[in-house]
Amino acid sequence: MAGIVGVLAFDRIWNVSKFLYYSMIGLQHRGYATSGVVMLNEGMESFINDVSPEDLEFQLDGWAGIGYTGSRRGYPIHNDEVAISVDGVLKDPQGFLRTFTKDREKALEEAKGAFSLVALTREGEVIGYRDETGVRPLSLGGFGFDMGIIASEPVAMNVIGGDFRREILPGEMVTISGLNVKSVILKEPKKAYCSIEYVYQARIDSFVNEGNVYETRVRIGEQLADEKPIYADTVIGVPETALPFAVGYSRKLGIPLDLGFTRTGSPIRTMLASDSFLKIVGVQLKLNPIKGAVFGKRVVLIDDSMVTGTTLKNTIMSLRRLGAKEVHVLIGSPKLVSSCPYGIEVPEDKELIAANLSEDDIAKVLGADSIHWLSLEGLQKAISRSTLCTGCMTKSYPKVI
Ligand code: SF4
């Protein structure tokens, strides 16, 4: 998974490097293992790949640029004429780049995969394209009358004081050049929005796939309350993703909401950490439980998903060490039972705890008093749409590649 962004100033006196840098910081929740940018100045010569966005700050110069922050090394890929950043899965990206350089509409029409893309051309265009499923998000915005911006999520625009205008439609290509923004529908939409974007991938203050992320997550919490009401002493959500779930659950059942954790250091997406030591250290660095919120209480703990269970197990242990009397776990997504072929890093089936153990066994392994996952129907109801990909929960995937 990745965050992609393109920024183009309408006047060449601008240097957009700081805007690009902060936009990329705003997208790091989508992945941060590697990053890179390509800037357009006199000769599109600023190709800097495989560096952290922090290293890029203020080093570059150019009136347009694109960036990538995510898990795939080498992006943005480029030749002398065009650079592209991709979120999702694009088959044969080098072959695509060659065709795109000669004929962009043909390249996009023939592209195989499930992806969103941002491109920068030497002629001075920033191009955004979202495949016909819309499985990966993409948005259009600007910075007053000075810049056009295309980014995975509106938060990349908000953090630099820009405005979100609208989402790019599935199958739509948008070209920003000069003062023009041109739209062409290249493919008929066959919407299959990624459900996980609403559950944990998109940022809490974002708007993706025609949905307000915060409001959707509150509705997921309310749905959990309908499915599994537990009249405990307190409800806490694992920051940051699951906090709105806890808000919805608390509101629906009238149970006090507490802040169960405080954050130490910068966020670490423990799900993506490669070894178990990092996962343990990650969770301890990330979340420090607050004793006053849980001591002597029956606690409902809500998290966004469960992959291997390592993170949750450590969290529950910490809560018990601080004196929680009972810990009931609710998960704001259906069980993850299969991997994702469309660019989200869900581990293989054999590593997914819900694909391999019964609920009682999982509760025992985690040290929880009970555990419940949101139902698929509950998720669809909370998202209020049926044009969804739910492949990693159902093993039934939209045919897109
Ligand atoms: S398989 Fe899961 S993570 Fe992948 S696109 Fe579908 S819903 Fe999203």
Image (tube, grey):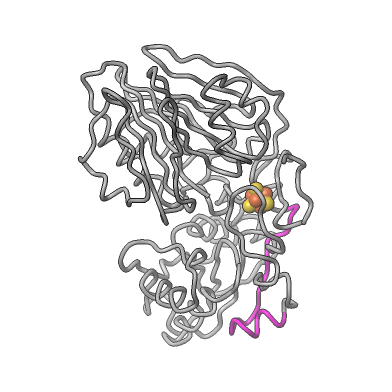
Q: Position of residue 97 (x, y in %)?
A: 53, 31
Does the magenta-highlighted stretch encompass residue 195?
no
Residue drawn at point x = 48 percent, y = 53 percent: 71
Count of numbered labels shown in the rendering: 0
Residue at image coords 36%, 29%: 7
Q: In terms of depth relative to the viewer, which is nearer, 106 or 239?
A: 106
Residue 186 versus residue 395: which sits nearer the camera?
186
In the image, residue 132 sits, relative to residue 183, either above or below, namely below
In the image, residue 374 sits, relative to residue 397, either above or below, namely: below
The magenta segment: 360-377
Q: Quadrant of residue 113?
A: top right
288 lies above or below 162: below
Residue 154, x across and y down, in percent: 44, 36
* Image quarter of the C terminus: top right
Residue 372 sits inside the magenta stretch? yes
Query: In this picture, is 134 found above or below 218?
Result: above
Q: Nearer the viewer, residue 111 or 170?
A: 111
Q: Position of residue 389 (x, y in %)?
A: 70, 46
Residue 303 in picture, x, y percent from top left? 55, 65
As rendered, which of 284 and 38 lies closer to the eye? 38
Side of 111 where 138 appears, left or right:
left
